[in-house]
Image: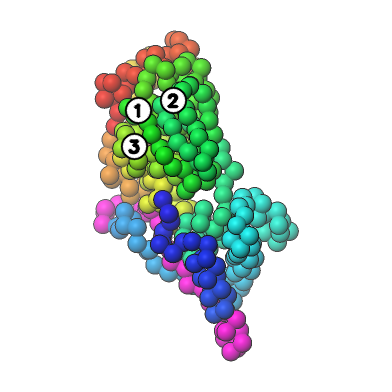
Amino acid sequence: MEGRDSSSKPCDLLKKIRDFTGSLLVDLCRGRSPSISLDRYRNYCTDPSGKCCCSSDLNKGKEILSLQREGHVYRLDVLLRVLLIVQQLLQESKHGSKRDIYYMHPSIFSEQAVVDRAINDICILLKCSRHNLNVVSVGKGLVMGWLRFFEERRKFDCIKSPCTVHQVPVHVEEVTGIMSIAEYILVVEKEAVFQRLADDGFCRTNRCIIITGKGYPDVSTRRFLRLLTENLCLPVYCLVDCDPYGFDILTTYCFGSMQMAYDAKFMRVTEMRWVGVFPSDSKKYCLPEQCLLPLTAEDKRKAEGLLRRCYLQQKPQWRLELEMMLQGGVKFEIEALSVSSISFLSDIYIPSKIQGQLYI
């Protein structure tokens, strides 16, 4: 979990920054227009032939940013401003969030996405991960279950009270001493479902660890999950809504996101098993019509886009379920399964899926 390169220590990164800015100054002093070469990464494409190389972690080409191109001038300006802030964080051994960085120049950065892109460009430029820059997420992930670990010498002992909810550590690189007597890890899409399982005492009757990223997971949640799988070698199951966005969250955990494709190999959990909810569950569990919602035009576009992603060739059963959802034209939430009993998820659905190996 150190990063993309062995030289990701603050002193090494500061040297890289000095060398980079020095080379820009040399170009300017010699009357040359500076340019920056950035490796480009992707974790999927829409090539139906199956002959693409997206599964490789190698770069997929180069992008050249130059002052000679009007569209690149602003992007380079933002990159250098963010790089200066990163240099300060590293020099002073401080941490800052992406939001902190945005508010240092809100009139110039205009929106958070501009800062996010610059941070990703800097990671690629310096061949490191985002946490190596001392740029952290405001953690939103939650964890509970049969788990014990330390973060910065602070002990988190979930085993003493497995249904007590804890925040996922923000500084995942400082997590040590991981120990568990769990039999599996369950990732749930939504905080409401996570809380339902906590209220039902699910972890008291099932030896497991439960994690939620509260929707699309942040970097800390994905890194923490990856760290647990590397250290504990436990099967990982995922429970998401039966809609295209739930499916996209599933693939984010499994394959990574396009925005951070350069770091996907440090966050993805390719051995993840999808435990539900499936389109076929609506008939299997006799959900009433009122629980089923029609797919919107946006939902359909999202599903069609997902079906074109090359990595689904590795998961043919996942693809079939998504096609079934699109053909059926309906979606439903995890909570719809509680129509017969408030604790149906905890008492019947999840245990029967895992014990009966009814996952894909």
Disc 2 element = helix
Dot 1 amino acid type: Ile
Q: Residue furthest front?
A: 153
- Would you place residue 270 above or below residue 130 in this image? above
Q: Which residues are magenta?
A: 24-51
Which residue is denoted by mark 2 in the rendering?
159
Q: Please state the horizontal and vertical placement of residue 270, each as a whole percent of the image.
A: 33, 43
Spatial separation of the CA atoms under disc 1 and disc 3: 9 Å
Q: Residue furthest right?
A: 107
Let me know if residue 224 appears in the view. Answer: yes
Q: Reading the chain from its start, which is encountered first: label 2 or label 1?
A: 2
Please identify, in this view, whether the residue under mark 2 or under mark 3 is nearer the observer: 2
The first of marks 2 and 3 along the sequence is 2
Amino acid on which the number 3 mark rests in the picture: Leu
For the residue pair 41 and 209, the one nearer the viewer reads as 209
The image quadrant of residue 184 is top left
* Tag 1 and tag 3, C-beta contact below 8 Å: no
Q: Give the number of the disc on residue 181.
A: 1
Mark 1 element type: loop
Q: Identify the mark at residue 232; answer none if there is no mark.
A: 3
Which quadrant of the figure has residue 251? top left
